[in-house]
Amino acid sequence: MSTQLKNLSDFSHTTVPNGANYTFGIIVAEWNAEITGALYNGALKTLLANGVKEENIHSFPVPGSFELTGGAEILLNKRSDIDAVICLGCVIQGDTKHFDFICDAVAQGVTNVGIKYSKPVIFGVLTTNNLEQAQDRAGGKHGNKGDEAAITAIKMADFSANI
């Protein structure tokens, strides 16, 4: 596995624009709250550390990862000032095909919302085989997917503003 010994949240190889001029929405799933809370804290910390003003970060909980796309859609429909939306969730493999259906629906939904609104909608959803893998990617040995999602949102908001 390529991530076995790698911190995925290392951004030393890239330039991150200052986020001071952008407004972000964060939609965070309440399901698997221990993990999604860590993802949220990472995203929030990273946005603030990269110049985003606290008053320009708008956070909204939704029940689960399946509802992330609906939350992003509602937010972008009602708030034209949002430059990018970060969707944070965690789906852990179980004994049924439910995992596959949820992961596919959320990935496709996040893509479709971004296309519909011509705004960056960031997929910050962990899709892991077990809780340990989720913990490793929510502030553990592989970094924090919330950090990654925040950096991606800043870079894409800047890209959108300057294209």
Image: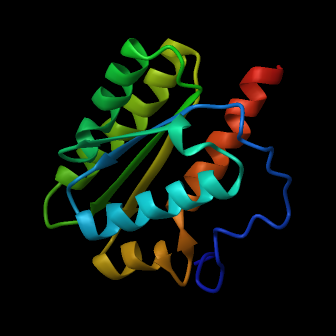
Query: Horizontal placement of 62 versus 20: left or right?
Result: left
Whether residue 44 is situated above or below residue 112 in the rendered picture: below
Q: Quadrant of residue 8?
A: bottom right
| Residue 48 percent location from the top left of the image | 61, 53
The residue shown at (56%, 51%) is 149
Q: Nearer the viewer, residue 98 or 85?
A: 85
Q: Nearer the viewer, residue 2 or 64?
A: 64
The residue shown at (64%, 77%) is 7
Q: Nearer the viewer, residue 76 or 89?
A: 76
Q: Quadrant of residue 138?
A: bottom left
The residue shown at (61%, 51%) is 47
| Residue 137 percent location from the top left of the image | 48, 72
Question: Please, which residue is most extreme toward the left here?
Answer: 96
Whether residue 9 is situated above or below residue 158 in the rendered picture: below
What is the total number of numbered labels drawn onto the structure image?
Answer: 0
Query: Horizontal placement of 158 versus 57: left or right?
Result: right
Query: Horizontal placement of 28 versus 54: left or right?
Result: left
Q: Quadrant of the C terminus?
A: top right
Q: Quadrant of the N terminus?
A: bottom right
Q: How is the image coloured?
A: rainbow
| Residue 133 percent location from the top left of the image | 40, 77
| Residue 29 percent location from the top left of the image | 28, 49
